[in-house]
Image: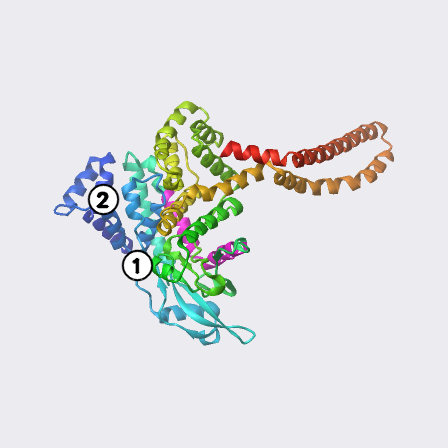
Amino acid sequence: MTRLLRATYIAWVALRYGLDELVLTSFQHPGVRLVARIASVGRDLSAPRGQRLREALQQLGPIFVKFGQVLSTRRDLLPADIADELALLQDRVPPFPAEVAITTIEHAFRKPIGEIFTSFEREPVASASIAQVHFATLREPHGGEREAAVKVLRPGMLKVIDQDLDLIRTMAGWIERLSADGKRLKPREVVAEFDNYLHDELDLVREAANAAQLRRNMEGLDLVLIPEMFWDLCRPDVMVMERMSGIPIGQTERLRAAGVDMKQLARDGVTIFFTQVFRDGFFHADMHPGNIMVSVEPATFGRYISLDFGIVGTLTEYDKEYLAQNFTAFFRRDYKRVAELHIESGWVPASTRVNELEAAIRSVCEPYFDRPLKEISLGMVLMRLFQTSRRFNVVIQPQLVLLQKTLLNIEGLGRQLDPDLDLWSTAKPFLEKWMLDQVGPRRLWREMKAQAPYYARMLPDLPRLLHGYLQRDAAGDARRELRELLAEQRRANRGLRAIAWAGVGFALGMLAMQALVRAHLF
């Protein structure tokens, strides 16, 4: 009965806000259209469709708000007006009572809250659809104290999420069966992606692990601060971390008044992002202004402070190569190479004609070159490439969609801080370094180190194995096996000599290679 009432309420909200109008034009069943028209007589549809969708999701509650936020990242699927409107969705959710948070904490650690913290602020400092955060003072084992932030999951979230997800899956199935665009939009795959995001965010230990990895990766960069996780106090529903203090990055007037260099801050944000992407292949994928502060403490003045690590992206070496080569080919206006990269990646059918894909990419990308480089959006370029690729039956990898969404966030934030930000000049050194790493001496050294254990294990055993074979009575087998053994030793020697000569060749040609790479790419 509860499920039926919830489904009825969702249908009523959808009709009230005219969401049926968004999809009925592609629905093939006339009965669906007729019922929706009758049930929605007298409604006001004067607002733009994207606004109506956003308001409907807000009325349906936190899970649907979160769904809209995730859906807004799929700009390769959505019209621009709807994606822009969904990007405005914010988690404006009333906090749950402090007593409930305290009960959750005490249940997680099986001790009174007074034994964990010397003080606990009952009023949360942040409240979202999944969790809320309280400040506290941590009682440390050696008797000291430390300022902490305590993130607590909303109670009962898993049950509510599973119920609403079940309904969303059902609706996605209807859309896929009844809508002519259903197969193209892949609604069930989008819901499955959303399911993964939500359940990842429901495990605060996973979030703590993401934060720890980013903190370790960013050590030594001196551009970003990431809170330390207190692992003894991390559970799936409670996470205790170092308390961070700073000015929210969206409060630009306060930052200027504090003396922060806004142009440098914008460049640092891009540097952090490209370092995470092209050096580490592990990036914070939720870098909107609500999750970023700026330190004004003397020792760390002007550094970014990253928060909320429920969503991270990972890239393989193959993904990084795809991105680096696409970006460089784009800025060289080599659209044929962009098309070839799509085919070589296997994301476009091998039967695709290069010239047709090249022409489609040219029509998307060429208009950008009427603008200065500082006005070119790499995020929009990537999005347009994805949209064009879909026309050729390409399935875009989720990690690249996540990267494109994060890149759009970074660009928007960077240009809010510095309207003259030239993203390409900041990205260029990372792409250049990545290409050199792939074809230069560092790649050779990595390969040598990877093969060294094999040769180290094999070579010391050769004399013993040779002696053993010589002692065997089966002369025919012994001779044959001896020949094989000696041939293997000769192959190993040739391999070692080849590696040595290659190292000499690479070392002698390093300067020339670097000059050629720079000339070729830029």
Q: Nearer the viewer, residue 169 or 56?
A: 56
Count neighbours of disc 2 (C-alpha within 10 A) and say few if under 14, some if 14 to 19, many if 20 or more: some
Label 1: element kind: loop
The count of marks equals: 2
**Structural distance between the alpha carbons of marks 1 and 2:** 22 Å
Q: Position of residue 105 (x, y in %)?
A: 43, 68
Dominant SS of magenta comes to: helix
Q: In this picture, is 221 found above or below 402?
A: below
Q: Which mark is residue 92?
A: 1
**Residue extending farthest left:** 42
Q: In the rendered structure, which amino acid carries the disc numbered 2?
A: Arg
Give the residue displayed 51% in from the left and 46% down from the top. Answer: 281
Asked if one can make out residue 311 in the rendered structure from this viewpoint, the answer is: no
Q: Which mark is residue 209?
A: none
Count neighbours of disc 1 (C-alpha within 10 A) and say few if under 14, some if 14 to 19, many if 20 or more: few
What are the residue bounds of the magenta stretch?
Answer: 189-216
Q: Which residue is mark 2?
A: 49
Q: In the rendered structure, which amino acid carries the disc numbered 1?
A: Arg
